[in-house]
Image: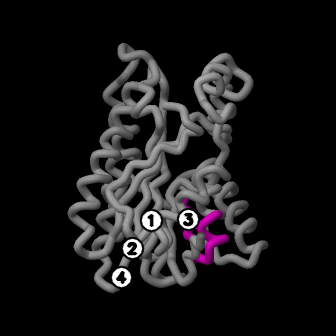
Amino acid sequence: MSTSSKARTAIVTGASKGIGAGIAKALAGAGAAVVVNYREDEEGAERVVAAITAEGGRALAVRADVAGGDDVRRLFDRAREEFGPVDVLVNNAGVATFAPLSGITEEEFQRQMSTNLLGTILTTQALAAQDDIGSASIVNVSTAGTLTHLVYASLYVASKSAVNAFTVVAAKELGPRGIRVNAIMPGPSDTEGTRAMGFPGSAQEAQAVAGTPLGRTGTPADYGPLVAFLASDDARWITGDVILASGGMR
């Protein structure tokens, strides 16, 4: 099966590490020119760019906060200046704090909803505002937690559940223009973020592995090929789908 993204320009938000970095590398490997977006981790983003260019790919790191309209416009402008119109968008940027219901504050609500949901909306608007693209593909990164309903993740799961619903509705609205919109729901994974939270080697990881038919947690390399496929013409008949990618955990 071909998953070529040759001659495409892709933006991957939150791609300085983890799942976003894996997706950026997979898209570059499929032939796309990739804009590696980051908000704070410039060093990490430049490492991803270096890894892509070392393999003969094209990549550029661009700092932008997806929760801000001016930043999003600047992100798309920079992508167009370097590589041309953007026809692949991966909304991977996300934040999460796990806490009991009593610990959710207005500030934390705004932080998670602004990045996880509003950021997805703003970047989707920016892609759709281009009047010189033909077919295009948007892939939103959600979470398997919208099905497993993890305790202490109510705010994060709520934000990603909203992303799932947005995906389906946006696919209906943008489909007539040839813009496909899908989402993937990764399961528990070994990333820089989960390592910082102490997940690998924890009782929570052991519980997750026990509940996963394929017997392990995910890695960034597990998700990149799926996104590259959804971005390619091989997936031209797929839109409005929210795809579980969790090793069977549900």
Horizontally, residue 182 falls left or right of residue 49, namely left
Which residue was labeled with disc 1? 89
Which residue was labeled with disc 3? 228
> Which amino acid, by three-letter code, is at mark 4?
Ile
Dots 2 and 4: beta carbons under 8 Å? Answer: yes
Q: Earlier in the sequence, mark 3 or mark 4?
A: 4
Q: Nearer the viewer, mark 1 or mark 3?
A: 3
Q: Earlier in the sequence, mark 1 or mark 2?
A: 1
Q: How far, Cα to Cα, is label 2 from label 4? A: 7 Å
Q: How far, Cα to Cα, is label 1 from label 4? A: 13 Å
Q: Secondary structure at mark 1?
A: strand
> Which amino acid, by three-letter code, is at mark 2?
Ala
Q: Is residue 110 magenta?
A: no
Residue at the spot x=40%, y=63% of the render?
138
Q: Secondary structure at mark 3?
A: helix
Give the quarter of the image for residue 246: top right
Range of the magenta residues?
Answer: 26-37
Q: Which quadrant, please, contains the N terminus?
A: bottom right
One can see residue 66 in this view? yes
Q: Secondary structure at mark 2?
A: strand
Which residue was labeled with disc 2? 136
Q: How far, Cα to Cα, is label 3 from label 2? A: 13 Å
Q: Nearer the viewer, mark 3 or mark 4?
A: 3
151 vs 108: above or below: above
One can see residue 74 in this view? no
Q: How far, Cα to Cα, is label 3 from label 4? A: 19 Å
